[in-house]
Amino acid sequence: MIQKSKGSNVFRVSNDKVIVYIGYRNQNGEMVMISTRGRYAIRLMIDIAEHQEDGFVPMKEVAVRQGLSLKYLEQFLPALTKNNFLIGIQGKNGGYRLTRNPEEYKIGEILRVTEKSLVPVSCLVEGAPECERRKICKTVDFWSGLNDVVNEYLDSKTLADLM
């Protein structure tokens, strides 16, 4: 019998066998590591960087250029403004601007703000209760290494690199 642990990507096949899936299920049921929220946030930030020389960039224009739903973009804009990635003003000539130069934004930091987590397994989530098997786990170093490689790569790329 297969059981899914609530709120995780861990499936228990039997008492001694556990399968871990990295990422999220998309609309087609396929596993992906980065959700549309993270991917769209990067596209949004690139678009703003490319168009902000004329002033604040209206979200409506970003949505049209990127072919994205304005309502969906508005779901993660607060996270980007709260974390000082963007500054926004309302009203005529309103919109958003970057708070730094594009080369100062690491792709990893944008994704860590917009995604629930980038860690490949739940036992590596910061603040998670320690797994009872951690001391004898033969795979924790593997997962930790994968986590390091992914984060190092994401932090080696900037918004300017993608423009």
Image (cartoon, helix red, strand yellow):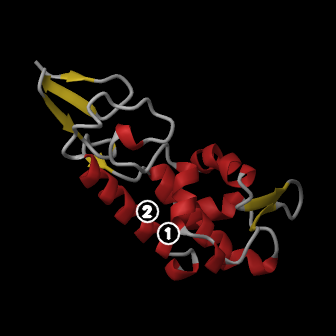
Q: Say which of 151 and 64 sits in front.
A: 151
Image height of 84 relative to 103, above or below:
above
Front residue of this view, candidates 128 and 64 = 128
Give the residue type that dot 2 points to: Asn
Q: Is residue 77 left or right of residue 92?
A: left
Q: Is residue 59 above or below residue 161?
A: above
Residue at 22% across, 29% down: 11
Farthest residue, direction front: 135
How far across and how far down the image is residue 142, in percent? 24, 54
Mark sitting on residue 115: none
Is 103 drawn above or below residue 114 in the view shown?
below
- Image x and y of residue 54, in percent: 79, 79
For residue 152, which quarter of the picture? bottom left
Whether residue 142 appears in this view of the structure is yes
Number of marks in the image? Answer: 2
In the rendered image, the quadrant that contains the N terminus is top left
**Dot 2 lies on which element?**
helix
Residue at 18% across, 36% down: 19
Q: Identify the amino acid type marked 1.
A: Asp
Residue 37 lies, with reference to residue 101, above or below; the image says above
Identify the secondary structure beneath mark 1. helix
For disc 2, the neighbor class at 10 Å (few under 14, some 14 to 19, many from 20) is some
Judge left or right: residue 10 versus residue 117: left
The residue singled out by tag 1 in the image is 155
Q: Confirm or deny contact between disc 1 and disc 2 (CB under 8 A).
A: yes
Q: Is residue 67 left or right of residue 27?
A: right
Q: Which residue is mark 2?
A: 151
